[in-house]
Image (tube, rainbow, N blue to C red):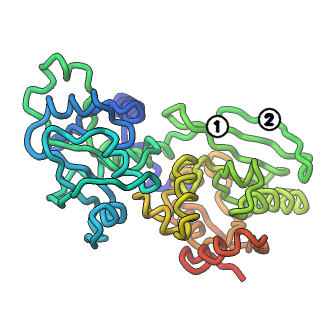
Amino acid sequence: MPASPLLQNPLGTPRTRAVHRAIADARRGVPVVLAARKPLIIAPAETVGAEGLRLIDLLSQGAAALLLAPSRAAAVLQHDVPETAPAIALSLARPLIDAATLKRAADPTMEQILPSFTMTEAPEEAPAALALAKLARLLPAMVAAPVRPGWASRREGADLLTVPAADLLAYPLELASTLTKVAEVAVPLDAARDARLVAFRALDQGIEHMAILVGEPERQEAPLVRLHSECFTGDLLGSLRCDCGPQLQGAIARMGREGHGAVLYLAQEGRGIGLINKLRAYTLQDAGLDTLDANRALGWHADERNFHIAAAMLAALGISKARLLTNNPEKVDSLRACGIEIVERVPHEFAPNGVNDAYLETKARRFGHLLG
């Protein structure tokens, strides 16, 4: 099939290497310098410690801020903020407040004993700073300050990484454009004895995505295809909070009956926010929020998944047309936008179990899933 323009490789190897290291540094709480028109030194509020805050104090100048998504900032400030803003900046006094307070400001599941914050003007590089937190599967909350001229010549700044803001924003598409098959093996399943697993890995050599192939879908004109985002709690533990387990097993069983099909098992837990953040969202749901509002309260969008990865997997498998097994019209639109021809949407509905009733109702009412 013709490649989608969204799947062209936007970055070269040295630039992606810098993004990989920036993700690793973010997870360790090490500050990085965001290269842009007005460079910033940044670190995630979730992981930064006393040493990281000391470095930011030492190597920065001007006002420091805590960058948050609008949905999270509104809760911290306890008043409305512009919902369309890419980020909200809360002013931080010097020396920077302690790391524990920053973690509480980032995480609504923690006890909210917070100082009084005031809004300030968000830097234009704020979206790239929050993008780094999301790439690292951390809460989207970043400490940021303008970096001092000559910072790199100081002993304390010599080991800090510089990463271009534009590269962080381009990186999700980079992952899709570099996805390749790395392994294929027969794995007979109870509902599909002729199943195969095909493993895919992107340039970062990190998270693997899997395709479960039943029969020979690549030889069919428009095989049945299911996009399934991994769900540790539902797929593996049999959690009743969602319908993920029945959807996965039901898709494989249906393909087994038809003789052909492909399930793309995407490493995008919790609609792309990661397992730990999904568990945090569950905590907020237990306090009364639905699944959409819980994600937003953590500072994430309602759905953070990257369906360019699914399109790249289908292209690598030689599948350009599909009957898509889904209740979610957004998946249909997303794959079509990436160049996959969807000839039919095939419903994939399972009855509520007494625990996930409100979850399914939210999927229909607020996510637009075609249920019932």
258 w.r.t. 42: above or below: below
Which one is in front, 145 or 96? 96
The quadrant of the picture occupied by the C terminus is bottom right
Report which quarter residue 40 is drawn in.
Answer: top left
30 relative to 144 in the view: left or right? right
Which residue does the image show at 51% across and 51% down from the upper left? 277
Total labels drawn: 2
Distance CA(mark 2)–CA(mark 1): 12 Å
- Residue 318 visible in the snapshot: no
Which one is in front, 131 or 242? 242
Residue 5 x %, y %: 43, 55
25 w.r.t. 234: above or below: above
Q: SS of the residue at dot 2?
A: strand
Neighbourhood count class around disc 1 (C-alpha, 10 Å): few under 14, some 14–19, many 20 upward: some
- Residue indicated by mark 2: 185
**Amino acid type shown at disc 1:** Lys
Q: Residue furthest bottom?
A: 372
Residue 153 x %, y %: 12, 20
Residue 178 x %, y %: 50, 39
The quadrant of the picture occupied by the N terminus is bottom right
Q: Are marks 2 and 1 in contact (CB under 8 Å)?
A: no
Which residue does the image show at 10% across and 33% down from the upper left? 148
- Residue indicated by mark 1: 181
Q: SS of the residue at dot 1?
A: strand
